[in-house]
Image (cartoon, helix red, strand yellow):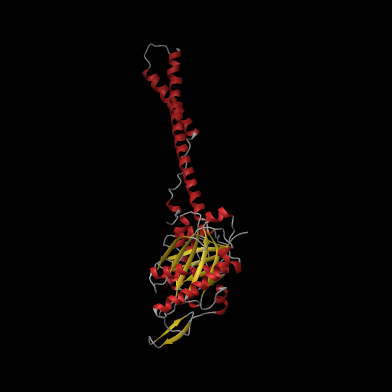
Amino acid sequence: MPIELKKIPEKIPLPFAPSVFRWLVAAVLIIILGVILVLYLWPEGTSTHSTWFWFCILALPLSVGLGCYAFRLRAYENERDRVNYWNRLHQEQHDIQMAKGQRPAGVLGKAYITPIACNKLASALINHGSQLQSTYFVHSQQALTTARLEPTTSHFSKESYSARLAGYITQLLRMLEPDLSVLPVDRLSVRLRHDGSLDNAQITQVWQAIFPASYPVDSLVVEQEGDGMMWLDAWLDQNEVALTLSVEINLFVEPRDYQSESISALLLASPAWLAQHDVKPETVIHRPVIATEDTCSLEDMLCWGKLSADEAHTLWRWRVDKEALTRLIQQSEKLGYSPGQDEDYMPDYLFGNPGAALGNIALLCACEYAMTSAKPQWVMMTDKTTHQVIVRQEAC
């Protein structure tokens, strides 16, 4: 679940200490009233030069005044101690949540196959422009703008699709082998998100037939539904020593307008795993946050990513509509940020819609460009929700 600092009960302001001057005035007034009262009630014919008279006229009112002041001072000290204790608990909880929120996932390996590049995808998109091509498909009698891994084939059967998918997964794992082979022997969690061309059982069958048995798999999650990068939020919440291979598949049976085919993988280590094995990844992915109308969501995201207002960065916008973008820019400007002022890319017109592979493709581009530019990458995207994340090169 999201970490929301605003849900931590607020600090309580310290109470005001009793004013010595005010209580001095009050003590004088009490003494004066005491004197008047004693003189008024003092029995006639009784000596006013006795010790008892002076005790009643001075000591008694003074004792009452000092007693009231002592009682008020004690009440203040008790309230001050209570507030200090509450605020200390608040600060401890705030520090715990801050430390939890700022722990990033480490990128230990990546591989992908796209129509435009199998390496340096961010550079290819920036320098070579759009990979989308408009083609007329006779079998469907319509022109579609797509980017396909096999442009000469217009459509596939379910059977040929399975064989095609197996071939691409084999190629992907071969590309990922150098990164997997150097890691300590640890159980691996695998997350597979696909576009629904096959059902979950068929995808699982293809994967298990190919994935090397030399890498023990702790869990395999196959899903069609997802929300871009937001799966990372729940994964980081687990705070376990974990390695996760995130694979996202977007392959066509029938071409889809303004979509691109791709298959991609990110090998991620949890903060606890990085600490246990003392591994420094080249790039890190901070905790993603869903963008809301409340500016606090943006503040949290910037806080988790440790991005300061004057820090040069690159902005990536994936499928963010104008309304959401306008709101995010207005919120950023209120906080003193100018997103994308130095460098801004909108890959929708360069890569097309990555479909089920949106999360991985966006993170891959950000990770690569973080290494190339040595600048933090501010990633905005819309899948089920509009959310944001900071990706940056790990400090040496």
Residue 156, given in percent of the width and then of the height, sits at 41, 81
Which residue is at a point 39% across and 78% down the rendered structure image? Answer: 158
Residue 194, given in percent of the width and then of the height, sits at 42, 70
Residue 106, given in percent of the width and then of the height, sits at 54, 60
Looking at the image, the residue that sits furthest to the right is 396
Which residue is at a point 42% across and 60% down the rendered structure image? Answer: 294
Q: The C terminus lies in which quarter of the figure?
A: bottom right
The vertical placement of 17 against 188, above or below, is above
Residue 353 can be seen, yes or no:
no
Closer to us: 279 or 43: 279
Closer to us: 1 or 376: 1
Which residue is at a point 43% across and 19% down the rendered structure image? Answer: 57
Closer to us: 153 or 383: 153
The vertical placement of 379 against 71, above or below, is below
Image mark count: 0
Residue 199 can be seen, yes or no:
yes
Residue 386, given in percent of the width and then of the height, sits at 43, 66
Q: The N terminus lies in which quarter of the figure?
A: bottom left
